[in-house]
Amino acid sequence: MEDIYNDGPQYLRDTTDISNHYGIKQTYSYSDDMLVHEMFVSLVSETILSSLCSVGSVFLVVFLITGSAPIGFVVMLSVGLVYLGLSALISLWDLTFNNVVVVHLIASLGLSVLYSAHIAHTYLLVEPPLELPVSRQRVWKSQVALSRMGSSMLHGIVAAAIAVIIAGVA
């Protein structure tokens, strides 16, 4: 089969029809090809569903922790944009959408949540100087939040590196 994304589902349907018509009842046909095709058939839809659920959960958790719906929305938006950008890179680089790519997407989703949530939480905790005009207070808070996140980001990077090393060995 040249085009696994288009021919794979048809192969599975044909095999299931033959098995149902000519096979023993209450049995399932097995073939290594079927496993490969089934993985590609279900992998894309399951990845999209779990990604949407993850981004929604990020909003809910950040909202519950910070008590700020706008901050929850900004974190959700930044995580969604990271995910969208990586999905575009998969297409641009002409990568095959397989288990390895999904693991990298999940790891990147986790890292983007980590960084975005920490920066947003620090932004909420920073008190701007009162002598600054209101228009400059947000910029000042953003700068301070980004500058204070150095140690937390380092911890996140080390934790992520350990997770990637463990995943690479497995």
Image (cartoon, grey):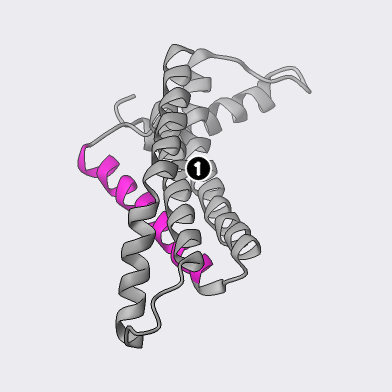
Along the horizontal axis of the image, is 59 left or right of 140? right
Q: In this view, does 77 lie above or below 49?
A: below
Depicted 112 relative to depicted 102: above or below: below
- In the figure, is residue 135 to the left or right of 62? left
Local crowd size for mark 1, using a 10 Å CA cut-off: few (<14), some (14–19), many (≥20):
some
Q: In which quarter of the image is the N terminus?
A: top left
x and y, in percent, of residue 168 in the image: 42, 17
State the residue at coordinates (63%, 60%). 65
Q: Mark 1 points at which residue?
A: 47
Task: Give coordinates of residue 83: x percent, y percent.
Answer: 38, 50
Magenta stretch in the rendered image: 71-93
On screen, residue 133 versus residue 99, left or right, reads left
Mark 1 residue type? Thr
Any magenta on residue 121?
A: no
Q: Is residue 76 magenta?
A: yes
Name of the residue lying farthest toward the right: 26
User: Is residue 11 among the parts visible in the rendering?
Assistant: no
Q: Tell me the SS state at disc 1.
A: helix
Residue plotted at (42% across, 48% down): 112
The residue that appears at 51% across and 45% down in the rendered structure is 45
Viewer-side residue, 4 vs 129: 129
Horizontally, is 22 left or right of 78 in the view?
Answer: right
